Amino acid sequence: MALSKDELKAAILEKAMTAPKPQLYVKDFYACDPDAKPRDVKNAANDLVKEGKMDFWSSGSTTMYAAKGRAKDEEHR
Amino acid sequence: MPKHDTPLLDELEKGPWPSFVTDLKRQAEKKPECFDILGQLELSFKDKITHWKHGGIVGVFGYGGGIVGRYSDVPERFPGVAHFHTVRLNQPSSKFYSSAKLRDICNLWEKYGSGMTNMHGSTGDLVLLGTTTPNLEPLFYELTHDLNQDLGGSGSNLRTPECCLGRARCEWGCYDTQDLCHTLTMHYQDEIHRPAFPYKFKFKFSGCPNDCVAAIARSDFAVIGTWRDDIRIDQAAVKGYITGEFAPNAGAHSGKDWGKFDIKKEVLDLCPTECMWMEGDTLKIDNSECTRCMHCINVMPRALRPGKQQGATICVGAKAPILDGAQFATMTIPFIEVKKNEDGEFAEVVEVIEKIWDWWMEVGKNRERVGETIMRVGLPTFLKVMEVTPAPQHVKEPRSNPYVFWQADEVEGGWDRDVKEFRKRNAQ
Ligand code: HEM
Ligand code: HEM
Ligand code: SF4
Ligand code: SF4
């Protein structure tokens, strides 16, 4: 059974806050709910960014996710 | 900001060509940060390494793409380019503008950025080069509210779709590239503005196999116009070319005297599938062998035209040479009618796109373009995912692998054969 959207978001945020690396690929969140479709996981992660709980970190060619404050911006180094 | 000595860059002002160095120097009179671009580039020429750092959290609220963070790694020396973010604007389909619109964009960029642009970037977007983080939100506000213009894609987003000018100006358009490009851009706003995939994904649309946007070389999803029936021939016009009444290639190569037009040398012998010949003064084409390369049509546009049953071929998986070398897109769907249904959507094309995405998001690795995923699993597996029956055109070369793999449903009894029954006949 797939998690509810709120449960999925909680699991993603938990992973983003505790993973050893601050920046994670969207695929790293698939494991949060193996039954969820990749697009649902992506949408849940993007929701967390909208809510200000996570940030997008982009190299320009790839975008990663980080819990708010975990990824350091060049400007705040 | 002071001027820097740039002897190496100054070399690029010599010669008859326009020079970005001259442009930058001129722009620096208005925007002194441009002196620092020149200074930093000169240093890079000396050090033989880039001094740009890229990546970061920059963007505008609600969007996860369209702005690429750029920072100098020598900001003490070049404070004007300490932050120098790039902004991508979604260009209109086929890049038609009024001059008033271009002026508005340039004025906005003088106000919030360096004034330097890249028209257009290789991604297709209008690229605005160089601004600071505090300027991003006000720029975005005016862009969307006053100019009715949006950001394009970057990062792991669907990238800004791009199309040739197609039926707007070109008689060879086999489908309406602008309509498909615009409709899909609107349909996939979420995928363009927010990361959606393990890596980038690009759509490009060409109206015919001349492929003016180089879709086959540059896009994960290339829709290239084609036709299914016979090339339309006007035999009288063929004679017109032979007698010299009409200039071949619509006169495109008339700067030099190439001698009299020779249909055998310039058309028949150059047909890649050797499917054209003359019977007396009648041109014949074996259309079942024609590979739709456009050569003969390009040379004799008055005499030859694409057929009437028009649509597109979909090729999947081109990429630049980051891993494993550059790769062209692979022909996947030989022919699809590109038509809009009552609700204004190109439903058949959307279905193909989403089949690819659903599979690639699951199976693709981080930072693996769909073309690399296909190469890794093999084309037969991909065709199965796409529910496409392999055609001869899917085969690149004769097989070198002696093994034949069967699927359970191709074998009598599947994989659940009764071993005891088998052993009765094949005792060990
Ligand atoms: C100078 C010594 C050897 C030569 C020149 C040689 C040459 C070959 C050649 C030409 C093949 C056919 C490859 C193919 O199917 O394309 C072959 C297959 C094979 N050889 Fe050798 N071989 C040598 C020594 C050995 C030894 C010492 C062993 C075992 C201890 C061995 C075991 C095998 C086996 C099991 C195959 C079958 C491989 C398969 O199933 O494809 N060979 N060998
Ligand atoms: C419990 C032990 C073993 C098992 C379960 C086993 C299993 C297998 C299997 C399933 C194949 C493939 C058969 C086919 O594709 O037609 C194979 C091939 C082969 N085995 Fe074994 N094997 C064992 C021990 C050994 C030993 C001890 C040797 C050599 C000293 C050996 C040498 C080979 C060779 C040379 C082949 C290739 C035969 C060919 O040319 O097609 N195997 N084995
Ligand atoms: S790709 Fe074909 S249809 Fe499009 S502009 Fe070029 S020649 Fe015309
Ligand atoms: S389009 Fe190309 S392959 Fe087809 S007949 Fe003309 S030259 Fe030959």
Image (cartoon, coloured by chain):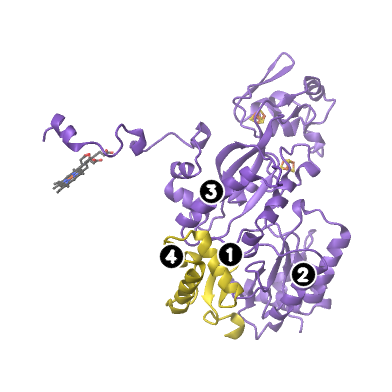
Chain colours: A yellow, B purple
How many C-alpha atoms fall within 10 Å of the one at disc 4: few (<14), some, or many (≥20)? some
Q: Nearer the viewer, residue B363 or B19?
A: B363
At x 88%, y 61%, the residue is: B100
Residue B201: give x, y in percent of width and height: 58, 56
Chain for disc number 1: B
Q: Nearer the viewer, residue B206 or A3?
A: A3
Q: Which residue is mark 4?
A: A33
Q: Amino acid at mark 2?
A: Met
Q: Amino acid at mark 3?
A: Lys
Task: Classify mark 3: helix, strand or loop.
Answer: helix
Dot in front, 4 or 2: 4
At x 59%, y 28%, the residue is: B273
Q: Amino acid at mark 4?
A: Asp
Dot in front, 3 or 4: 4
Q: Residue furthest top?
A: B280
Q: How far is the residue under mark 3 from the one under mark 4?
A: 21 Å
Q: Earlier in the sequence, mark 2 or mark 3?
A: 2
Q: Which residue is mark 2?
A: B116
Q: Which residue is mark 1?
A: B195
Residue B313: give x, y in percent of width and height: 61, 39
Q: Which residue is mark 3?
A: B355
Q: Amino acid at mark 1?
A: Pro
How many C-alpha atoms fall within 10 Å of the one at disc 2: few (<14), some, or many (≥20)? many
How many C-alpha atoms fall within 10 Å of the one at disc 1: few (<14), some, or many (≥20)? many
